[in-house]
Amino acid sequence: MLVPSLDALMRILIVTPLIYLAAVVLLRVSGKRSLAKLNAFDLIVTVALGSVLASTVTSSNTALLSGVAGFGLLLLLQILVSWLTSRRHVTSSVVRSEPTLVVRHGEFLPDALAEVRLTEDEVRQAVRFQGVGGLDQVAAVCLESDGSVSVITDSSVGDGSALTDVRGWRAD
């Protein structure tokens, strides 16, 4: 079907602004942390929120109140999990992965690269993206729990305290 029925079109025109308004209100109430992409769990929740929003707008089988309830429940679960992980180390280690050091003092760590399935070329690309011309200028490269790659240069490593939670880091 290329053109929706008039009923389906009217439903979209009415439901879309209402679910949008509900989403804005619920996101404001739940706080900034609700859409942060700090780890894989956060990404899953963000995708699920988008899916609930989309199905509420486009599916005549999903009532507006059901969509709002699903959206709100996902946010409530996100708040609960983030609250637990910020207070209980055991819960945190279940939800979040720890950062992985893949370069230390300009040297690739082959076992770590294999573990996180990164290539040396991908790491070099991340180093270049940070405006660094050589690995000899790099103190550390870490694959973070959210999947991003952090590059710490020798000139910016400071006392290394930001790397204390990275297994395998040592200032030397």
Image (cartoon, helix red, strand yellow):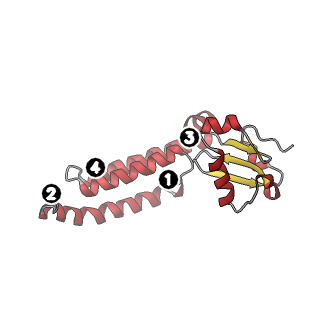
Amino acid of disc 1? Ser
> Where 64 sits versus 88, above or below?
below
Name the element at disc 2: loop
Q: Position of residue 46 (x, y in %)?
A: 45, 51
| In the rendered image, the vertical position of residue 11 relative to residue 112, given as above or below | below
Can you name the residue that lies furthest to the right here? 172
Residue 37 x/y as whole percent: 53, 52
Question: As drawn, is 77 to the left or to the right of 105?
Answer: left
- Label 4 sits on a secondary structure element that is helix
- Label 2 vs 4, first from the N-terminus: 2
Mark 1 vs mark 3: which is more N-terminal? 1
List the residue tagged with mark 3.
84
Q: Which residue is mark 1?
A: 34
Circle 3 packing at 10 Å, graded few (<14), some (14-19), many (20+), is: some
In the image, which disc is placed on residue 66?
4
Quarter assignment of residue 156: bottom right
Q: Earlier in the sequence, mark 1 or mark 4?
A: 1
Q: Which residue is mark 2?
A: 1
Crowding at dot 4, Cα within 10 Å, few <14 / some 14-19 / many 20+, comes out as few
| Residue 106 circle label | none
Q: Mark 1 or mark 2: which comes first in sequence?
A: 2
